[in-house]
């Protein structure tokens, strides 16, 4: 006999501190508390639902039998995904289905699912099998071992994407880079802030009114939750087997608005207190020493070209900076980030790191050239050229370190074949 549909909660998007009792939320068969509730947000996923539910049930029955539930939250899909799912509840009593007709959106679907969940650990996974279910057990283990948040990441060891187009890859990384600028205290805490595959301890997310937009529910959890320990598990983002992605430009625009909103004083103030633990000071000192060698190379080449060869200032600066970038990459790869680089051997991955390093440093170069001209021409009235250059170099060095740490040396091993 099919289980009744869950009635969608209304009101603020707020996870309760204690799990609702079985009397409050059907079915009565499961006595709370459960260890784990996994929300599966769906929109037009009828071709995937049976597969994902069967795979999740098999995995979780072997890991925490009777201690978990699956909550599928469907936004009234035209392909009636909720109906397909409800028909599965007879075979899988641990599956509960919610059909939302008043609200829409991936992030709010996840939170509405967490609002009726009875687990102490709350998770989310996509229905389309692009998030490999077996990674779940590692995430669950990390949370049981004490992590407040365990996120599947494409950008740590064992992570990657199958064959995303260059455009999607660029958009995803570009969005991450922007995020690191607008809201480093949130985006900088995980290597894959775009991940939609993670789990969080109820106590770490319960209470605050969540206000997510679009797809990036993880940002909302990090930005508004009380998250101390974060664990990351590498996974390779798979190809879809049926249906198609609902990501449009709208999600990217919403993402930026979301970041700007998260950057409110209170939240960032609290988050920034956590940041020093994330700031790898020793590594930054090495980076700065390498940067110093780069300054000497930059100055020497600038001198040789602008005084020795009589080349124009900007052209000399561009060549000098590029030579310095090369110098810095070699030292950083062999010393500052050696521990991360050794997990990404091979000339092609090294060349990719050099490219990323170059793009990031060139962005810094543009900032450096602008700052040099501002200081030299506007502030020092065309005097103190080298002091102007030094003042231009410092902010750029901090920028380069932070973005390179998060993007260049973070592992993004593309799945071969
Ligand atoms: N309830 C509900 N409402 N579910 C939705 C909606 C919605 O409006 N839009 C999408 N979903 C469901 C889809 O059915 C799927 O199960 C999941 O959310 C992801 O949607 P996709 O459209 O397949 O997203 P994607 O594959 O491009 O990106 C996914 O993976 C990225 C990397 O982890 C998403 O999870 C992204 O958030 C994530 O960054
Ligand atoms: Mn997908």
Image (cartoon, helix red, strand yellow):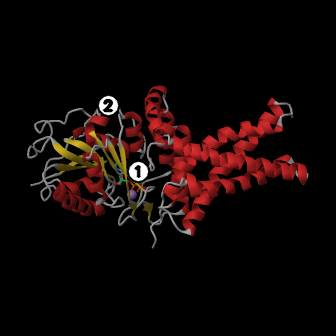
Say which of 11 and 187 sits in front: 187
Which residue lies at the image location 39% right of the left edge and 64% below the top edge?
238
Which residue lies at the image location 50% right of the left edge and 43% below the top edge?
280
Q: Is residue 261 above or below residue 141?
A: above
Q: Can you tell which mark lies on residue 195?
A: 1
Residue where numbered disc 2 is placed: 12
Tell me the mark number nearer the camera, choosing from 2 and 1. Answer: 1
**Dot 1, crowdedness within 10 Å: few (<14), some or many (≥20)?**
many
Residue 88 in the image, given as x and y percentages of width and height: 17, 58
Residue 254 in the image, given as x and y percentages of width and height: 48, 42
Kindly state the secondary structure of the residue where label 2 is placed.
Answer: loop
Q: Viewed as shown, does residue 35 lie left or right of 213?
A: left
Residue 303 in the image, given as x and y percentages of width and height: 84, 48
Q: CA distance from mark 2 to mark 1?
A: 24 Å
Residue 144 in the image, given as x and y percentages of width and height: 24, 46
Which quadrant is home to the N terminus?
Answer: bottom left
Q: Viewed as shown, does residue 339 lie left or right of 96?
A: right
Which residue lies at the image location 25% right of the left edge and 64% below the top edge?
51
Queried on whether the Cβ of the residue with tag 1 lies below 8 angstroms from ligand 1, the answer reads yes
Quadrant for residue 227, please give it. top left
Q: Viewed as shown, does residue 243 lie left or right of 54?
A: right
Ligand 2 positioned in quadrant: bottom left
Is any atom of residue 400 visible in this view? no
Kindly state the secondary structure of the residue where label 1 is placed.
Answer: loop
């Amino acid at each position: 006999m099919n289980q009744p549909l869950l009635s969608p909660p209304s009101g603020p998007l707020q996870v309760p501190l204690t799990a609702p009792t079985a009397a409050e939320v059907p079915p009565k068969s499961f006595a709370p508390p459960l260890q784990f509730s996994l929300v599966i947000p769906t929109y037009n996923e009828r071709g995937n639902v049976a597969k994902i539910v069967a795979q999740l049930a098999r995995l979780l029955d072997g890991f925490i039998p009777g201690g978990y539930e699956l909550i599928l939250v469907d936004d009234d899909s035209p392909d009636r995904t909720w109906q397909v799912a409800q028909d599965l509840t007879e075979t899988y009593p641990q599956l509960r289905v919610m059909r939302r007709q008043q609200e829409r959106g991936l992030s709010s679907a996840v939170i509405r699912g967490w609002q009726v969940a009875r687990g102490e650990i709350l998770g989310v996974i996509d229905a389309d099998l692009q998030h490999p279910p077996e990674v779940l057990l590692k995430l669950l283990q990390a949370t049981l071992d004490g992590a407040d948040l365990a996120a599947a990441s494409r950008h740590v060891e064992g992570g990657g994407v199958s064959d995303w187009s260059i455009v999607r890859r660029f958009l995803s990384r570009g969005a991450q880079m922007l995020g690191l600028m607008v809201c480093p205290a949130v985006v900088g805490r995980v290597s894959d802030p775009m991940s939609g595959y993670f789990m969080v301890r109820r106590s770490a997310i319960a209470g605050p009114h969540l206000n997510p937009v679009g797809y990036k529910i993880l940002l909302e959890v990090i930005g508004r939750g009380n998250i101390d320990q974060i664990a990351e598990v590498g996974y390779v983002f798979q190809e879809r087997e049926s249906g198609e992605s609902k990501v449009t430009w709208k999600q990217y625009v919403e993402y930026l608005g979301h970041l700007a909103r998260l950057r409110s004083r209170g939240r960032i103030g609290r988050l920034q207190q956590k940041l020093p633990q994330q700031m790898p000071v020793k590594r930054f000192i090495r980076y700065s020493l390498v940067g110093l060698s780069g300054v000497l190379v930059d100055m020497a080449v600038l001198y040789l070209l602008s005084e020795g060869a009589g080349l124009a200032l900007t052209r000399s600066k561009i060549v000098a900076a590029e030579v310095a970038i090369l110098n810095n990459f070699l030292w950083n790869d062999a010393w500052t980030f050696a521990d991360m680089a050794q997990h990404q051997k091979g000339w092609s991955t090294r060349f990719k790191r050099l490219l990323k390093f170059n793009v990031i440093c060139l962005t810094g170069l543009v900032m450096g050239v602008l700052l040099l001209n501002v200081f030299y021409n506007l502030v020092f009235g065309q005097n103190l050229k080298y002091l102007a250059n030094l003042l231009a170099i410092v902010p750029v060095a901090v920028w380069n370190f932070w973005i390179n740490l998060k993007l260049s040396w973070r592992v993004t091993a593309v799945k071969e074949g």
